[in-house]
Image (cartoon, rainbow, N blue to C red):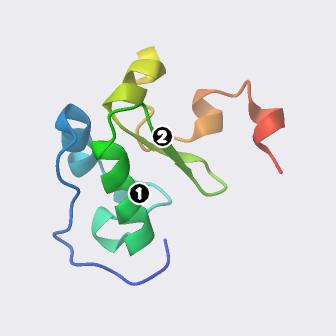
Amino acid sequence: MTGAAVPQNWSPVGGGELGDLIRSHDWAATPLGAIGTWPAPVRTIVQTLLLSPVPTVAIWGRDGILVYNQGYAEICGPHHPEALGGRLLKLWPEPAPSTRT
């Protein structure tokens, strides 16, 4: 990710089990990069979705990296928790024709 770096100790608050998974996930192994380097807009979206009472997912970049809350984890079904930080089209290749631009 590009943009202003934030303190390396930044992490989202709340979110229950999903918040814990997001905080402990190896984001450096994804195109999003280490959680401490996420720019403010990404941090804001992740914090907002964690606090949302409705199923919410953010899908980032050409790779379609997934970050979601507890409600969306239930929608993921057997794909959770592997879907967290995963690529949308690798997990669900069926929508590929409609998600490519």
Residue 56 in which image quadrant: top left
Residue 88: % across, % down:
59, 37
Residue 51: % across, % down:
28, 44
Residue 87: % across, % down:
56, 41
- Give the residue at mark 2: 57
11 in relation to 74, above or below:
below
Residue 54 in view in this figure = yes
Q: Nearer the viewer, residue 28 or 8?
A: 8
Q: Amino acid at mark 2?
A: Val
Residue at the top extreme, as displayed: 78
Q: Amino acid at mark 1?
A: Ile
Neighbourhood count class around disc 1 (C-alpha, 10 Å): few under 14, some 14–19, many 20 upward: few
Q: Secondary structure at mark 1?
A: helix
Q: Residue at x 39, y 19 (%)?
A: 74
Neighbourhood count class around disc 2 (C-alpha, 10 Å): few under 14, some 14–19, many 20 upward: many
- Give the residue at mark 1: 45
Q: Residue at x 20, y 33 (%)?
A: 17
Residue 21 in which image quadrant: top left
Residue at the front extreme, as displayed: 53
Q: Residue at x 20, y 67 (%)?
A: 10
Q: Earlier in the sequence, mark 1 or mark 2?
A: 1
- Does residue 48 appear left or right of residue 67 in this picture? left
Residue 42 in which image quadrant: bottom left
Q: Are marks 1 and 2 in contact (CB under 8 Å)?
A: no
Q: Residue at x 26, y 36 (%)?
A: 18
Q: Secondary structure at mark 2?
A: strand
Residue 39 in view in this figure = no
Residue 84: % across, % down:
40, 38
- Does residue 32 appear left or right of residue 89 in this picture? left
